[in-house]
Image (tube, rainbow, N blue to C red):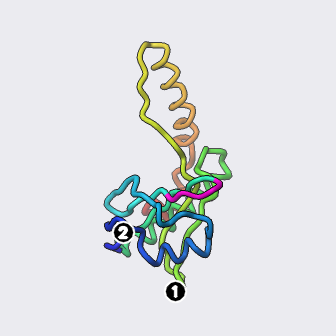
Amino acid sequence: MDEALDDRLPSAVIDALRVDLPDAGTSRAMVVGQGWDVVAWRVPAPHGDWLVRVPRLAEARPTIEAQHRLAAALEETGVPLPREPRLLRGADGEVLASLYRYVDGWESHVSGRAARRRLATSIAAFLSPLHALDPAIDIECGATPS
């Protein structure tokens, strides 16, 4: 998957996106982040952009698939998640990428105690339910080794 390090989406991912999301602007995709195992691309589309996570290595494919299963399990808990998650698969059934609706964000620059308190309260409202979940969910989905 070293092709993902190029300035273009890998051709197999483009082909799969053309089938799954024919209106997506794959030629205008841009890298928005990268880690040791994936490169994240923002792909524009008329009704909202997509984030496409392309594995850098074949070994990352099972992790991406497990993260997808975990997201499906978490959806039932009410934890806020990106919308419309799905996996892109090649003709051979192998995971090519995961994708979901792009979540626009920004760095928070707050000043003053009241603003910091509001920000902390907002972050806690997200993290508290997430941390209250049974860790067995991660293990059952394969997102965390047992």
Nearer mark to the viewer, of 1 and 2: 2
Residue 93 screen position, x and y as percent: 54, 82
| Residue at the (48%, 73%) spot, across then down | 13
Q: Name the amino acid type tagged 2.
A: Ala
Pointer 1: residues within 10 angstroms few (<14), some, or many (20+)?
few
65 inside magenta stretch: no
- Vertical order, 104 against 73 (above or below): above
Pointer 2: residues within 10 angstroms few (<14), some, or many (20+)?
many
As measured in the structure, the alpha-carbon distance from the residue carrying label 1 to the one carrying label 2 is: 19 Å
Residue 128 screen position, x and y as percent: 54, 35
For residue 92, which numbered disc appears in the image? 1
Prevailing secondary structure class for the magenta stretch in the rendered image: loop
| Residue at the (51%, 68%) spot, across then down | 65
- 113 and 19: which one is in front? 19
| Residue at the (41%, 17%) spot, across then down | 111
Name the quarter where the N terminus is drawn: bottom left
Quadrant hosting residue 84: bottom right
Mark 1 / mark 2, whichever is N-terminal: 2
- Vertical order, 21 against 72 (above or below): below
Quadrant hosting residue 47: bottom right
Q: How many marks?
A: 2
Q: Secondary structure at mark 1?
A: loop
Q: Is residue 5 left or right of residue 90?
A: left
Q: Secondary structure at mark 2?
A: helix
Disc 2 target residue = 4
Name the quarter where the C terminus is drawn: bottom left
Residue 89 screen position, x and y as percent: 54, 76
Residue 123 screen position, x and y as percent: 51, 32
